Image (cartoon, helix red, strand yellow):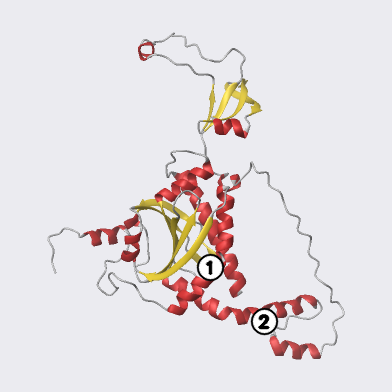
Amino acid sequence: MMSDGALSQSEIDALLGGMNIDDGSAPAGGAAHGDENERTALSNFLSTTLQNQSSNFSTFLGFPVSLTGPELSFTTRDNLLEQLPSTVTFIKTDYSSGFPGEHSFIMGEDMSKTIASIMTHETDIQMDDMALSVIGEVISTMVGTQITALTNKTGNKSIASLSPETSNVPKAVAALPSDTFLVAAYKIDMGKGSPQQLWEVFGTSVSSAIAHALNTGSTSQAAQPAASGVTSGMQSMPNTGMMGGNMMGGMQGMGTPTNVQPVQFPNLTPRTIPQEQGNIGLIVDVYMEMTVELGRTKKLIKEILGMGEGTIIELDKLAGEPVDILVNHKLIAKGEVVVIDENFGVRVTEIVSPSERTSD
């Protein structure tokens, strides 16, 4: 049917999201239906990671955080958009190998600002590159925990994901799958009022492949440790590629191995990380503004308007007193001005204590 040239809201949302406009083949409204065995397998698996995920969030934020759920359901793009706030932080973390395909996380802008503000110790934070980088690191850790658990459960050691691509966008721009897909809804309790919502989106091929591996991987994994243990213990035995009964048959003609020794593992010594360091390693590549402040003063507007060339402004610093060194407008150290060749510099003479930094 020909139109008057104006785009409908659904067409605009589809174009912004980079998706094909709905032709009526996908369900519109109501619940989307999928494989119940697939949903159950993913739900059971994700539930086993909740304790580690809660611990990860607690470590990042510096206080106890609890993740509950997840509630898994098959849905469509339009149905999920109805549940999302108007502006979201979209983190694209597609699987590159193992179970390649679409994978992403979504959280509301308010939740993103809360997490970024706590981790950077900034108030009135904006969702700039630094804040987005912090959110990306948090989600990257979540994905890493899942990949480790998936590897242990399925025996698939090729599982990997792409680096997070994080953006703060109107919800219609979020690059969601165009067909029916599986979404996991978590609740995150940070002890600051009502729990926040986090959504994890699995593309159809990803959820199907993971569920299949979870349902079939237990038997193949059970035989793997025994086979690898025999192979590693017999250094003189050639690699014949035999498994199970074939390997045992080949061993009978080779006699008793004489070079079998127990594997020696080093003792695990727990490392203590100073509390002050926190998670600074996660954002060491982020640029920050450093300023050296010679001094300050207060002037009336009429005095400022009366300034001209040659005007002398008296500051609140005494001659020879240390200057302030600020990072992102926060005092972190004091120093003395020096001259390096033809440039000014500053020699750090004192590092401000953490209590003085937070009280600034």
- Amino acid type at circle 1 is Ser
Q: Are marks 1 and 2 in contact (CB under 8 Å)?
A: no
Residue 158 seen in the current view: no
Quadrant occupied by the N terminus: bottom left
Q: Secondary structure at mark 2?
A: helix
Residue at (50%, 65%) from the top-left corner?
Answer: 95
Residue 177 position by quadrant: bottom left
- Amino acid type at circle 2 is Ala
Q: Is residue 131 above or below residue 304?
A: below
Query: Which mark identifies residue 47?
Result: 1
Q: Is residue 237 above or below residue 158?
A: below
Residue 347 is left or right of residue 313, and the answer is right
Residue at (69%, 87%) from the top-left corner?
Answer: 244
User: Where does the image place residue 319, in percent across and percent down from the top left?
Assistant: 59, 12
Give the labeled residue for mark 2: 223
Q: Earlier in the sequence, mark 1 or mark 2?
A: 1
Q: Residues within 10 Å of mark 2 (few under 14, many from 20)?
A: few
User: Where does the image place residue 27, in percent across and percent down from the top left?
Assistant: 29, 73
User: Where does the image place residue 199, in percent across and percent down from the top left?
Assistant: 43, 61
